[in-house]
Amino acid sequence: MADTPVDTIDALLADATAEVDDPEVRYKLRTARQLTDVIEQHHDDLVAVAVDATSSDEVEKQLHGWRLGK
């Protein structure tokens, strides 16, 4: 699959989109895939704020580890 849970969700949605003929369902699946991008960006923004607030390399490592699936 993929490296992170969000990447896995995106891959599953992409596969489902490719297998569906109903335009309304395809629209909903594409919208859900776009929301995974929003989730990833939101996470990255929160990591940046937390790192700035703590100035801790350990906090940064732990927060980025989640994104990498570790």
Image (tube, rainbow, N blue to C red):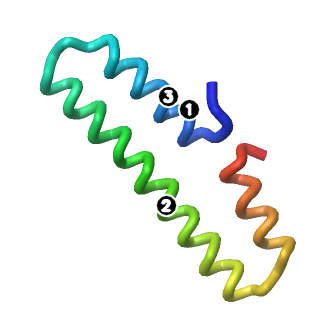
The residue lying at 68 percent from left, 88 percent from top is: 53
As displayed, is residue 45 above or below residue 67? Answer: below
Under tag 1, what secondary structure? Answer: helix
The residue lying at 37 percent from left, 39 percent from top is: 33
Q: Residues within 10 Å of mark 3 (few under 14, many from 20)?
A: some
The residue lying at 20 percent from left, 12 percent from top is: 21
Residue bearing the label numbered 1: 8
- Give percent across and percent down for residue 47: 63, 70
- Give percent across and percent down for residue 2: 63, 31
Q: Residues within 10 Å of mark 1 (few under 14, many from 20)?
A: few
Query: Residue 31, which numbered label?
Result: none
Q: Give the CA distance from mark 1 to mark 3.
A: 5 Å
The amino acid marked with disc number 2 is Gln
The amino acid marked with disc number 3 is Ala
Could you tell me if the residues under marks 2 and 1 are in contact, i.e. CB atoms within 8 Å?
no
Tell me how many marks there are. 3
Residue bearing the label numbered 2: 41
Q: Give the CA distance from mark 2 to mark 3.
A: 17 Å
The residue lying at 67 percent from left, 37 percent from top is: 3
Where residue 32 sits, quadrant-wise, is top left
Could you tell me if the residues under marks 1 and 3 are in contact, i.e. CB atoms within 8 Å?
yes
Disc nearer the start of the sequence (2/3): 3
As displayed, is residue 27 above or below residue 38? Answer: above
- Give percent across and percent down for residue 7: 56, 38
Disc nearer the start of the sequence (2/1): 1
Specify the quadrant that holds the N terminus.
top right
Where residue 22 sits, quadrant-wise, is top left
- Give percent across and percent down for residue 16: 37, 19
Q: Residues within 10 Å of mark 2 (few under 14, many from 20)?
A: few
Residue bearing the label numbered 3: 11
Q: Give the CA distance from mark 2 to mark 1.
A: 16 Å
The amino acid marked with disc number 1 is Thr
